[in-house]
Image: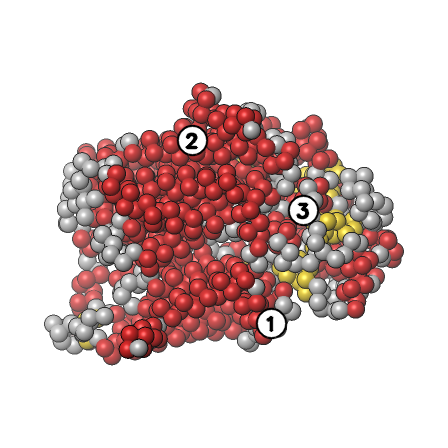
Amino acid sequence: MSKKIEQTQAGEKVFDWLLLLFSVGVLVEAFRIDGGLRLNSAGSFPVGLALVMLASSIAILFSHRRKRRDPRIRSALHECQVFLHEHFQPHIVVFSVVSVIYLAAIIWASFYISTFIFLAAMFIYYRQGRIISSLIITSLAIAVIYVLFTMVFRVYLP
Amino acid sequence: MSDTFSYLLMAWLDPGLLGLTALGVLAGIYIGAIPGLSVTMAVSILISFTFAWDINNALALMVGIYVGGVYGGSRTAILLNIPGAPSAVTTAFDGYPLAQKGEAGRAIGLSTVMSVIGGLIGVAVLAGTAPHLADLALQFAPRDYFLIAILGLLLVSSLSGKSLARGIFSVALGATIGLVGMDMVTAQPRLTLGSMELLGGIHYVVVMIGLFGVAEAFYQLHNMAKVPVKQKVDKIIPPLNMVLKFLPLSIRTSIIGVVVGALPGTGGDIASLFAYDHAKRTVKNPSTPFGEGAYEGLVAPETANNAAVGGAYVPMLTLGMPGDAVTAVIIGALVIHGLNPGPMLMIETPHIFWFTVGNLALANIFLLVFGLTGIRIFSKIVEVPKAIMIPLILVLCVVGTYSLNSNMMEVYWMLGFGILGYWLKVFGFQMGPIILGVILGPLLDESYRQAMSSVGDRGGDFLLALVANPLSLVLTTVIALVLLGNTPLKGWLVGRFQRN
Amino acid sequence: MFKPLLTGLAVAAGTLALTGNALAEYPERNIQGTIQWGAGGATDNVVRSLTPHVEEILGTTIVLTNRPGGTGVIGMNHVMRQRPDGYNLLFGAENPQLYPLMGLADFTYDDMHAVNIIGQGLVVIATHPDSPFDTFAELLEYANENPGELRMGGTGAGGLPSTIHAMINAVGELDVRTVTFGGDGPGVTALLGEHIDFMPLSLSAVAEQIRGGRLKGLAVLNSEELEELPGVPPITEALPDIESFLPWGPFWGVFVHQDTPDDIKTILEDAYQQAVASDGFQEFLENFGGTTLNLSGDAAQQYLDNWQSVTAWSMYEAEAVETSPEELGIPRP
């Protein structure tokens, strides 16, 4: 309970508005379950929970009145820039994109092949070269996964 | 009497059984540590594997895996902030901060000793009071489960970091995720947005792996360059005075663990939550503040979830009703071996009961041995450079999620929850309350509707029932006290009291 | 940097296509088994006892998962949405045959392939030992004097208790509160704790409890007293008219996706036929209060059709359901 005024992060307010929007969406969906509010039916709890989410997200938005923006951030545009700079650094973007491609690739290129390529590519990228050692680590990791999951636990991997 | 004793010591004296229990514990620790590989799954695989074996051998292996697996979940929770199993979610609250301070070795050592203490207390309660505890567990009516779930949700929000509103939002979000799918009573689809895939609901392990594993991996991308903390590995076995200091707390949390574990339908996950909250309320001067690496915050959930194992066996051995998913599978094993699990089991085949008690105690001893060896290597995991660790975490999350149901769709959801979790984390939301909401939400919904139907859908009678029965009254009072303790009303009351 | 990656993927996909044709013998890995009902219930017990025998024959592991909820719709829907490669089995009870009638789902077992109809069970209406009622007639009398007072355990719309309830209402009147549980197991637990007053259950789920004196049988859904349950009167003593529905019982079966290759269907059918016939399982089923059917192929289909038509039409004629079986293409028995 410190008296210090908390600072919001870049994009925090927008995110909290999105949560409010999400809560409204859930509420609408929940109402549609049995078309109204009843004491004991399939929709009772979803509606109740959506209301709780709505109330708490409004409370979160209200708490912004007690916070202020980082004084170094000058304008909304600047905030946007800070936000992009913080969360969209090249290595984060690369990891996210490659992860999505990796998941998509599992289905049509089988698990082990796509995992090998994914791991090798990420290791080489993050460790700036050092190809040989990266490939060795990748092979080791794949071997461990194979022994543990496919042989010992007999889990089927696509 | 001498018969009882010989059954009790059977597993200790037979080299074959001794070996199988040890093997089970060792395997269990690793199964438990890997998110997605569950003890339930391992034990089901074992059933077919041990089909032709002698019943005692089969049971010894299963007991070992069960005990080892419940403990193993804490390993990855402490080292990577990724709980290996839902019952280790609360362990991560204080375990991971400890690892970040370089105390991973000490944290694992302490959690091992405490798990064993909790496990042994659980066994003792099982041996001493099984029939009475089973009768107590049966007393819990749907309305009491409803109150337990409410209590759980209240505790979660009080556990949630800097902002109460954010905590409440997280819990409600989790519970909403837990309710997605077909309604149990009327089979109506709920919140599925017309998707057939979502009719079966979202498995809480999928959410857990996404929120903890993937979100953590993304979050750590921020400080890639940060050199991992060097782990102190010299003092792994906790000194005796430390163990003694935490002994009173561990006994209290173990009792919580056994009772919650004995209730059919609740297990180690909810037990460890209650235990953590209990520690937070009763320990006035923790080693460091809770959430920042308090030993007390590690002791409480670890004792409780291992004590819950003993608890889960209570209704299974006395009534033939499973206390949790693993004991349900073990009931299947008993049936296959020609036994009839039910109220007559203890009367007709008492040796199964005493053998299990002795075997559980033995498994806990092995847990101490295996848990304390190899910590040095384990804690080095934290020192692996992020460049290698982060991609590996993602692969592990994929494998773990896929091995649940062999369903690629769940892997996509897992990634989705990971991205959602990343943003929530960035803006100050906690992951723990969300996942506990996912676990408690369905319990809340189910028990509420059962309780409501029991009183013929009359709201007034429902409220009356919450105070009319002694057990419900106790739970309602606890909830009222928790509510009072969390609101400004408390300050006002205390202020008045002091003035007088 | 993606170019080499994509080429790699393309090469990998090519290799996979080549090796894909030379698939090894079925089964080459674990089989996923989905149980429609919760742990500890009748279906669960039957399946868990049968599975090791099948595993021995097939030489693989069947990983069993309970997916209860929505009267089994959730579990069945899950299996129907998996790849038709024979690695996903559904273990279900009788309920799907009534889904369209109850408006729960638009599919039945006709949309899957029946590997084996394992056996048929008996139904007993059970209560806790402290209950003031000793027979179902007494309970009915009380319920008629105090409508909407007694609490009956249920397993959701279309579950066994709701079917029995509909049958009783078809020939008499029983106005009670229904408390829904995730399956027989949690229902029995609530009955043991006296949180509900009675529940129609599979005999298999409660035989041990009745034998151990923790539960009391009020009636068996049969026209005569059962050898296994001496002292429990047949339901016809309380409701003579219910005779027209009898003999009636829930059944358990194993199903796979309809598009599963024929040779895999045959392998599964053979394995299950052998397993159900094995001495170990036969002994279990007898202890458990069930009768073996062990039907596959046309015989299984005929059994399913017959069960559906008898149950659906009797429920319709008793006005327990609004939808006419005729609209759903269910022929009169």
Q: Residue A135 appears at what percent x and percent y?
A: 23, 35
Looking at the rendering, in which quadrant would you find the N terminus of chain B? top right
**Residue B83 in view of the camera:** no
Identify the residue position indicated by label 1 in the image.
B461
Amino acid type, mark 3: Arg
Chain designation of label 2:
B
Left or right: B45 with respect to A96?
right
Does B32 sit above or below residue B223? above
Does C102 sit above or below residue B205? below
Identify the residue position indicated by label 2 in the image.
B362
- Give the image quarter of residue B495: bottom left
Chain designation of label 1:
B
Closer-to-camera residue (B12/B229): B12
Chain designation of label 3:
C
Left or right: C258 with respect to B442?
right
Does B359 sit above or below residue A58? above
Could you tell me which residue is drawn at 25 percent across and 43 percent down?
A: B242
Q: Residue C44 appears at what percent x and percent y?
A: 61, 43
Could you tell me which residue is drawn at 58 percent across and 73 percent down?
A: B459
Badge 3 crowding class, 10 Å Cα cut-off, few under 14, some 14 to 19, many 20 or more, is many
Alpha carbon of mark 1 to alpha carbon of mark 2: how far? 49 Å
Amino acid type, mark 2: Leu
Identify the residue position indicated by label 3 in the image.
C214
Asked if badge 1 and badge 3 are on a common chain, one would say no
Q: Residue A112 appears at what percent x and percent y?
A: 36, 38
